[in-house]
Amino acid sequence: MPAIGARGLFTAPEAEEVLRATLPALRALHGRIVQVSSLTGQFAWASSGLYSASKAAVELLSEALAAEVARPACG
């Protein structure tokens, strides 16, 4: 896979834009985010390394977001 293709798997500006745009409303309405992924985020098979890594990254992003929104705001 060309380097630009691999880089594209890990850059998802759309996901960040959606989160930034909707997070204030989700907080105000006590909404929830449901993240759906793939088993390949937990297990990698031959020839699925880059895809598996990108799915694992989505899962870790979701875990980090949950921790960030769970803590009280500073200041």
Image (tube, grey):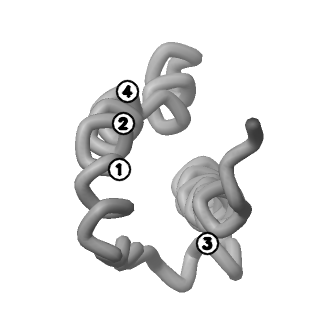
What amino acid is found at the position of numbered circle 4 in the picture?
Pro
Q: Position of residue 4 (x, y in %)?
A: 49, 15
Nearest to N terminus: mark 3 or mark 2: 2
Image spot of residue 59 (x, y percent) = 60, 66
Q: Closest to the observer: 14 or 50?
A: 14
In the displayed structure, would residue 37 be above or below residue 18?
A: below
Instruction: Look at the image and tell me in which quarter the C terminus lies.
Output: top right
Residue 23 in percent (x, y) is at 35, 50
Between the C-alphas of marks 1 and 2, the distance is 6 Å
Residue behind mark 2: 20
Seen in the picture, residue 43 relative to 52 is either above or below; the reply is: below
Query: Residue 14 location in percent, x, y?
Result: 28, 33
Which residue bears the numbered disc 3? 41
Q: Residue at x 37, y 27 (%)?
A: 13
Crowding near the residue tagged with mark 1, few <14, some 14–19, many ≥20 C-alpha atoms within 10 Å:
some
Q: Amino acid at mark 1?
A: Leu
Q: Which of the pair 61/31 is nearer the observer?
A: 31
Q: Are marks 4 and 1 in contact (CB under 8 Å)?
A: no
Amino acid tagged 2: Arg
Q: Which residue lies under the disc numbered 1?
A: 23
Q: Which residue is labeled 4 in the image? A: 13
Label 4, label 3: how far apart the Cα atoms are:
20 Å
Residue drawn at x 25%, y 48% as measured from the top left: 22
Residue reaching furthest front?
75
Tell me: 70 left or right of 35. Answer: right
Helix, strand or loop at label 4? It is helix
Three-letter code for the amino acid on which mark 3 is drawn: Gly
